[in-house]
Amino acid sequence: MSHQKSCTIALLLCLLVLPVAAVLAQASDAKAKSIANKVMQSMGGEKSWNDTRYLAWTFNDQYQVWDKHHNRFRWEKDSLVAIIDTQTKDGKVYVAGQELQNPEEKQKLLERAYALWINNSYWLVMPFKLQDPGVALTHVGEETTMDGAQADVLEMTFENVGLTPQNKYKLWVDKNTGLITQWAFYRNYNDAAPAFTRRWSDYQTYGSIKLASNRSNSQSDFNLTHIAAPKAVPEKVFNSPTPIEKL
């Protein structure tokens, strides 16, 4: 299976909205919280994360720019462009430079853009989200990653948050660096086997935070590209009806 097909399938799975499982997260244990704090510090710290306003990246041929402070999200693929408010979910959709007027089609694409914001940003910034409200972490032991490094393993579950609260993740935190270097995604909390296990590696510093680009595994290569955390962006970024130049 090609990396693009594999990741497209994973994306669709992430967007499924299923009934909330009866058994969900318990309160994070003390060791898990301590490891999560170490991850945050290794990534640049909470203040640096909060101060980072703009993030841009390409995920599976989709380019997006997120204004965290003003809740604006621009998403584009080919000639399709959506610009939404991530709080109100309102916005505009453009096809080949023309604003979409049909209210039903527009609403459907705005809802899709909102779901893509949640999914695509998680593939970029998940390590900063370990202690968000509604997230529960459990330290489940120590293991060796696919690259042979020793790591603490966290299980992450959710309680009534996000579009897919029935999901579960397994996270490998490198004992030396304090960085997440591998993750596994489970569609449902009770699944015995993950839908995928992938690297979370190739960290670089963007602005004042660290982000990783490599999401590969033995079955497929996959990378996030065009990652940027600029201090400022032109206002046209959130107004242009046509694809923009990468930041």
Image (cartoon, helix red, strand yellow):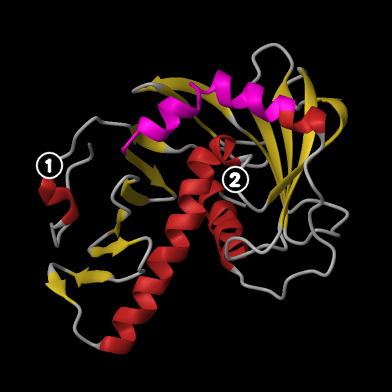
Considering the image in quadrants, where does the C terminus appear?
top left
Q: Quadrant of residue 77?
A: bottom left
Dot 2 crowding, Cα within 10 Å, few <14, some 14–19, many 20+: few
Q: Is the magenta stretch mostly helix, strand or loop?
A: helix
Q: In which quarter of the image is residue 162?
A: bottom right
Where residue 46 sits in the image (x, y, percent)? 49, 28
Q: Residue at x 20, y 79 (%)?
A: 100
Q: Residue 132 carries which label?
A: 2
Q: Which residue is drawn at 41% across and 34% down?
A: 50
Magenta highlight on residue 190? no
Q: Please, is residue 97 above or below residue 206 in the view?
A: below
| Range covered by the magenta-colored residues | 34-53
Tell me if I can see residue 17 in this picture.
yes
Q: Residue 234 carries which label?
A: 1
Q: Please, is residue 154 above or below residue 142 in the view?
A: below
Magenta highlight on residue 38? yes
Name which residue type carries label 1: Pro
Where residue 36 sits in the image (x, y, percent)? 67, 30
Tell me if I can see residue 218 in this picture.
no
